[in-house]
Amino acid sequence: MAEKEKNVVNFSDPLSVLIVEDNEVDYKMLSSMLKDESYKISYSQVTETLADAVKALKEKSFDVAIVDLNLSDSKGELTLKEITEQFPLLPVVVNTGAYEDDLGLKTLGYGAQDFLVKSKYTAYTLIKALRYAIERKRLELELKDTMEQLSVTQRQLIEAERMRIIGGLASGVAHEVKNPLATILYGVTYLTDHVQVDDEKYQVVLDNIRAATHKANNIIVDLLDFASLSRLNKKATSLEDIIEKSLSLVGHEIDKHKVSVSKEITKDLQDIVVDKNRIEQVVVNLLLNAIYSITEGGNVHIRVHNGCLSSEMIKSMGLSEHYFKNGDRYLFMHIEDNGSGIKNENLDKLCDPFFTTRRAKGGIGLGLPVSKNIMELHEGSLCVQNKEDEGARATLIFRTSL
Ligand SMILES: Nc1ncnc2c1ncn2[C@@H]1O[C@H](COP(=O)(O)OP(=O)(O)OP(=O)(O)O)[C@@H](O)[C@H]1O
Ligand SMILES: [Mg+2]
């Protein structure tokens, strides 16, 4: 090796290299080339079969692998496929036969980062190929990560825009409808107080109009609420106090539906920094959903505990992997019921504005979307799932400072 050639290679990080090669002449040549001190190879290992290569890669992490595709236990692109699928972070340089330049080029499309053609490389071009492969893999992974982040951001922007449009429409319609409703309510009250009509049905009709007007007004209040969620007043608050206040707010419905409530709250409960009124609104919505799903005499169980998110939870709760990471600490609150549960075909629609299966009983379908929005504004989340046995479970997760 000419001195001049050696001096050009000037990388500081030492490399560990796995050589997957069953031809003795080839692996001896590769090993001897890698032995040169100036190339900073900290460790190299030879395996002659794919099975041994997989074993070695599981036991030790390598910076890069040089892989001959035709081994005794695997041939051609299948060798590369097996390695790239099992070790997606590993940079791979394929070592192809003497006249297989075309095949070498093709392997780049199958996941290799570079290729060598036997008998056509020198120690210098070998080291350059390894370094290039590592850098190319790093850039590939960085690009993949950026693309994922971009797609998450794009989805969030679309969702934010959708919510902005719905919010704008909702508040526009709500303001327009509020005044005529007030006029109707005033008219009904006036007729009740000032006009005596000798007809039984007269009073019934007025009562029906009043009830319908109140219902319409409640919808308007919900819609205006939906449109003005960005104003939060966050303070350190006890979740236990929020639960007690929410239970007292729905006390009448609990009694009416003869529902029993049980609680299991962790002893080391820390305060959470939230807008107390908004979180009460969320808990009330979830309690009402649980109560309404239950036929008389059921149970609502509230569980609060600290915990870490797992990859499985992130998936099953439909959380964005960009914001919610495996191992992040959260405060979990579950509201579990033994009610009707949710039909599978409805699970994906629960948080869509105006989706309800209780329209005939006065449901509007804003409880969950509003609640989810509130939780997301608190950097937490909400999901409703069926329980393993019967009924449903609504889970809230709150960021804690731990
Ligand atoms: N605990 C639960 N058990 C069974 N179904 C549920 C439960 N929670 C929510 N759902 C389903 O999700 C739908 C949407 O809930 P959401 O709270 O958004 O609206 P709603 O309760 O129908 O009306 P409202 O706007 O008055 O809250 C419900 O109609 C119901 O079908
Ligand atoms: Mg509801």
Image (cartoon, helix red, strand yellow):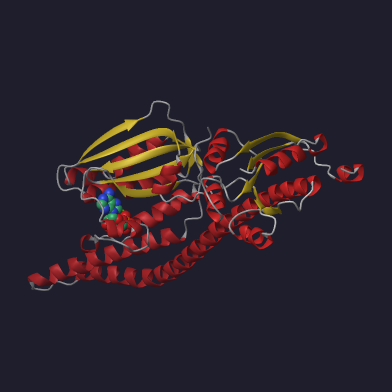
Asked if residue 286 lies left or right of residue 328, the reply is left
Is 58 situated above or below 208?
above
Is 98 situated above or below 54?
below
Q: How many marks?
A: 0
Residue 228 visible in the current orientation: yes
Q: Quadrant of residue 310?
A: top left
Q: Quadrant of residue 205?
A: bottom left
Which residue is at 42% across, 30% downward?
Answer: 269
Asked if residue 170 lies left or right of residue 51, the reply is left
Residue 366 visible in the current orientation: no
Looking at this view, is 205 or 392 the one in front?
392
Q: Residue furthest top?
A: 267
Looking at this view, is 255 or 300 the one in front?
300
Q: Position of residue 74 (x, y in %)?
A: 52, 48
Is 398 situated above or below 347?
above
Q: Position of residue 293 (x, y in %)?
A: 22, 50
Which residue is at 78% across, 49% downward?
Answer: 125
Which residue is at 32% across, 56% downward?
Answer: 347
Looking at this view, is 314 or 368 the one in front?
314
Q: Position of residue 194 (x, y in %)?
A: 20, 70
Q: Position of residue 206 (x, y in %)?
A: 18, 69
